Image (cartoon, rainbow, N blue to C red):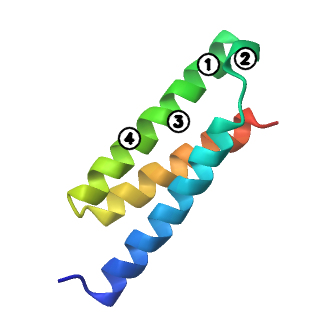
Amino acid sequence: MQSADESQAERRTREVLARARALLSRVTIASLSQEARQQHDTARRFVGQAEQALLERNFVFATYLADKAEALAKGLGR
C-alpha cells in the first residue's frame, strides 16, 4: 500500500511524463539537427527510464528523470 506522499509523487511524476510525451510528439524529427535529434532520443530514454523507475516504486529517481525529459523536450520546442 502506498503512503499519501508516494501517491502524490507518483501522480506528479506521471503528469510531468505526460507533458514530456506531448512535447516530444509535437516535434518533427526530420527537421531537427543532429544534436537536437540526440536530445530528442535522450528525452525519450529518460521517459522510458522514469516509467521503469515508477514500476520499481523508486519515486525520487522517476521524478528526476521525468523532470530531465520535460526540460529536454521543452528545449526542442523552441
Near mark 4 (Cα within 10 A), the count class, few <14, some 14-19 or many ≥20, is some
Along the line of sight, the residue nearer the viewer: 44 or 60: 44
**In the orientation shown, which residue stands out farthest toward the right?**
78
Residue 47 position in % (x across, y down): 45, 43
- Give the amino acid at mark 1: Arg
State how far apart marks 3 and 2 are (Cα).
14 Å
**In the image, 57: left or right of 36?**
left
Q: Residue 43 carries which label?
A: 3
**Mark 2 near mark 1, Cβ–Cβ under 8 Å?**
yes
Q: Circle 4 sits on which residue?
A: 48
Q: In which quarter of the image is the C terminus?
A: top right
Q: Residue at x 64, y 47 (%)?
A: 22
Along the line of sight, the residue nearer the viewer: 29 or 65: 29
State how far apart marks 4 and 1 are (Cα).
17 Å
Q: Circle 1 sits on which residue?
A: 37
**In the image, 37: left or right of 11?**
right
- Give the amino acid at mark 3: Ala
Compare marks 4 and 2 and give the one earlier in the sequence. Answer: 2
| 22 w.r.t. 33: above or below | below
Dot 4: element: helix
Q: Residue 78 carries which label?
A: none
Res 76 → quadrant: top right
State how far apart marks 3 and 1 are (Cα).
10 Å
- Give the amino acid at mark 2: Leu
Residue 39 position in % (x across, y down): 58, 27
Q: Circle 2 sits on which residue?
A: 32
